[in-house]
Amino acid sequence: MTIHVAPGTVVLYSDVACGWATLALHRFYAARREAGLEEDVRVDHRLFLLEDVNAFPLPKAFVDGEIPVFAELAPDFGWQRWQRPDADWPVTSLLANEAVHAAKTQGPAASEELDLALRRAFFAESRTVSMLHEVLAVAEACPGVDAAALREALDDGRARGRMMRDYRSHRDAVQGSPHFFLADGSDVHNPGIEKHLEDDVPVVDRDDPDAMARLVRRAAAA
């Protein structure tokens, strides 16, 4: 099924609990800000649910092993290994992803803000973003998000069905998290990064931080 991308947007298939997507977005927003295109190029967040693709809970040991790699690539994000008891570890990201999609009804800026805040809550603050009260607390700290409206949307589940239908429809077209799709028909998975695994730890073979600046410019031109 064709992935429609509206002018002035990039469609991003990702998972809130994906470190590579979080790194990509951190760089995307920085490149967009530097280019002065914050109002011209927006992110249309779509779900690529890793726990469903992999058919196992979010793996703590694997994520902890990735953190030093991300910290080296983007030290200003504040990455840290999980600081709370193992029992507090969020084994699912489904609710957090649903919240991002529910926030889309408030506009792309609200969705972007909540998505990044949830990623920072998980990867930099060790917060259990699988729990409703924690997701809502993150939302309440986002100036551009109406947390009360978000609570209503999560209570009645209005975003879940639409989010999952899109995920099921496009899962086979998505290479992984993150995968960007542009209005000019182009797409790129994990821009600028080439890597491999050694003993379940990612090793970066090539990192091109300027790849994101090129993607932002191409999205704006499209």
Image: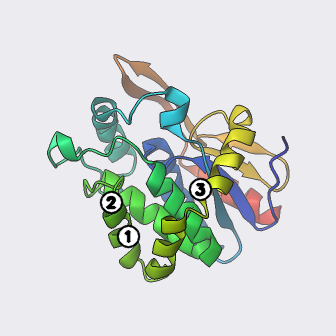
Residue 4's disc is none
Which quadrant would the N terminus be assigned to in this image? top right
Q: To which residue does mark 2 refer?
A: 121
Identified at 50% across, 63% down, the residue is: 99
Determine crowd level at label 1: few under 14, some 14-19, many 20+ residues with C-alpha closer than 10 A. Answer: many
Helix, strand or loop at mark 1: helix
Q: What secondary structure is found at the residue carrying circle 2?
A: helix
Report which quarter residue 186 is drawn in.
top right
Amino acid, disc 3: Arg
Circle 1 is placed at which residue position? 136
Residue 160 got which mark?
Answer: 3
The residue at 85%/53% (across/down) is 184
- Looking at the image, tell me whether mark 1 or mark 3 is earlier in sequence order: 1
Q: Secondary structure at mark 3?
A: helix
Left or right of 59? Residue 162 is: right
Q: Of the residues shown, which amino acid type is indicated by label 2?
A: Ala
Q: Nearer the viewer, residue 179 or 156?
A: 156
The amino acid marked with disc number 1 is: Leu
Q: Position of residue 130 (x, y in %)?
A: 36, 52
The residue at 44%/78% (across/down) is 147
Instruction: Quadrant for the C terminus, please.
Output: bottom right
